[in-house]
Amino acid sequence: MKLEMNKLMTSGTGIFIMGIAWLLFWIGPAFFLFEKDPRWGHNFVIPIVFMTVGLASHIRTTACDLTAVISAFVVTIPTLLALWSWETALILACIFFGIEIFLYLAERKAGEIINPGPGLKVWLKIHLLNFSYIGMLHMPLIFFISRWSNPGPFLTYLPVEHDIPTTIFNAMLFVLVPLAVMERYVKTLGGYAVSKIGFAWSVLMIIIPLVVINLAG
């Protein structure tokens, strides 16, 4: 049991849990904000991308990894650049998540659907998940580089988000992504397992914004 728990304490697991917690928060206590302004609907979308990437980190087949990469880029970037509505983004996010679940179940019975030659397969195993994390990294990049200083062009589909919890979450994502990539190559950092550091950091990304929200009243 301890061995299984150690395997689960990874950045990928943390990202998956974060996606679930984020989605539940907006379906539950924060739903009134969406009712007042539907532009907050992107908070139903990006959590599903997180869940897709987090799940792929444990399935680790080429088809599922590729699905996660596509979701991380195709859904995240246009959604946070306000190129389409949250409804469109939600449909796409759910489709990719559904495809990943389908592929996982199908490949358990039939084997890997995408099975390239050994050299390419190794390369894809190494890099696809990293690309997924890079896709996620566009969330804070867009937030701080574009939306923070100049929210005007995005207001059709996205609200102004200068609140402290959102800012903290985006800033912390700059740390989580390198940890998620690093854990695949480096076992320990300062005597601690990198995978556990990433998992702990992702849990803090849930706790700290919630604490700030409660303190702010």
Image (tube, grey):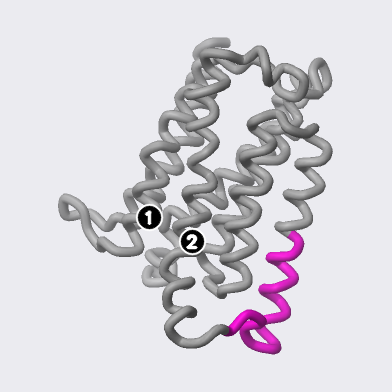
Name the residue at 26% across, 61% down. Answer: 186
Place of residue 192 in the rendered image (x, y in percent of width and height, measured from the top left): 22, 54
**In the picture provided, is 189 more to the left or to the right than 106?**
left
Kindly report the distance in space between the C-alpha atoms of the residues bearing marks 1 and 2: 8 Å
Amino acid bearing label 1 = Val
**In the picture provided, is 67 more to the left or to the right than 148?**
right
**In the picture provided, is 6 more to the left or to the right than 17?**
left
Amino acid bearing label 2 = Leu
Q: Does residue 6 belong to the magenta stretch? A: no
Name the residue at 69% across, 65% down. Answer: 100
Place of residue 55 in the rendered image (x, y in percent of width and height, measured from the top left): 58, 61
Q: Nearer the viewer, residue 66 or 101?
A: 66
Place of residue 181 in the rendered image (x, y in percent of width and height, measured from the top left): 38, 55
Which label's residue is closer to the chain start, 1 or 2? 2
Dominant SS in magenta: helix
In the rendered view of the protein, which quadrant contains the C terminus?
top right
Q: Nearer the viewer, residue 69 or 109?
A: 69
Q: Nearer the viewer, residue 138 or 169?
A: 138
Specify the segment rendered in magenta.
Answer: 98-115
Place of residue 212 in the rendered image (x, y in percent of width and height, measured from the top left): 49, 19
**In the picture provided, is 199 more to the left or to the right than 90?**
left
Q: Residues within 10 Å of mark 1 (few under 14, many from 20)?
A: many
Q: Nearer the viewer, residue 90 or 114?
A: 114
- Residue topped by disc 1: 181
- Residue topped by disc 2: 129
- From this view, report whether residue 120 is shown above or below residue 25: below
